[in-house]
Amino acid sequence: DIALPNIEKYIGKEDDRLQIGAIFCAAIAYAGSGRKDVVKLIKPLITAEGTTARVLSFAALAIGLIYIGTMRSGMMSKLVDKIVNLKDTEIDDKYVRLLSLGLGLIFYGRQNECEAVLEILSSSEPNKVTEFAKVAIITCAYAGTGDVEQIQKLIRLCLSDDKLYHAAAIMGISIIAMGDSISSQMARRLFDHVLQYGKINARLAVPIALAL
């Protein structure tokens, strides 16, 4: 196990560049492994006071990759709690959306098993990250299924005032639709409509969505 000693050596360093390097090492080396001992090294970065938003976000993404599709309830509750209780200074950080993706990856392929967490996020005080988290969870849970109901949910999210999570919703539609030819055709028609009449964040995501 060559990677683990290096992760242990650097993940506790004060230099956040070294911490992030160790986090990426864990994410790449142990993606999909479900290794509790590796997550145990990263988890303090989620719960500790004083962790920067950048380190927190990369730590959540690494945990999501290691626990992808596992529905580990203990880790889910910690990430949800962190998202709901983010400080104002953290909410606007450009990296913090990775926290949402990390949570979403834990639900990868689990479809309607994500509904309870979506309810928790919907009932909490809304902020930019909770909405982004809902998009990430739906996208990961239904990736490749062609589920029309979930595609419609993401479409409805794009009807509000222009927000950055609209871009994630457009890409989410593509990720869900890619497993089904009928859903893919529907998504392409939708993207044509978005390019003509959609809000700016949604329009910016369309080229990536089409490529997917």
Image (spheres, grey):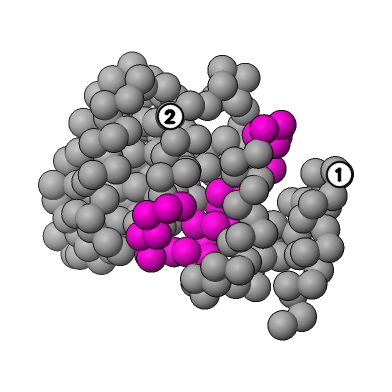
Residue 158 is labelled as none
The residue at 44%/36% (across/down) is: 81
Q: Is residue 74 magenta?
A: yes
**Residue 70, image x and y in percent?**
38, 65
The vertical placement of 204 against 25, above or below, is above
Residue 15 is labelled as 1
Q: Residues within 10 Å of mark 1 (few under 14, many from 20)?
A: few
Q: What stretch is highlighted in magenta?
A: 49-75
**Residue 47, image x and y in percent?**
59, 41
The vertical placement of 85 against 56, above or below, is above
In which quadrant of the rendered view does residue 192 lie? Answer: top left
In which quadrant of the rendered view does residue 182 lie? Answer: bottom left
Looking at the rendered structure, the secondary structure element under dot 2 is helix
N-terminal of the two: label 2 or label 1?
Answer: 1
The residue closer to the viewer here, 131 or 42, is: 42
**Residue 97, image x and y in percent?**
52, 38
The residue at 23%/44% (across/down) is: 116
Looking at the rendered structure, the secondary structure element under dot 1 is loop
Q: The N terminus appears in which quarter of the rendering?
A: bottom right
The residue at 66%/45% (across/down) is: 45
Residue 84 is labelled as 2
The vertical placement of 122 against 188, above or below, is above
The total number of labels drawn is 2
The residue closer to the viewer here, 34 or 29, is: 34
Q: Is residue 157 magenta?
A: no
Q: The C terminus appears in which quarter of the rendering?
A: bottom left
Q: Residue furthest bottom?
A: 1
- Name the amino acid type tagged 2: Val
Left/right of residue 99 with respect to residue 37 in the rendered view: left
Tell me the CA gap for discs 2 and 1. Answer: 27 Å
- Name the amino acid type tagged 1: Asp
Q: Are marks 2 and 1 in contact (CB under 8 Å)?
A: no
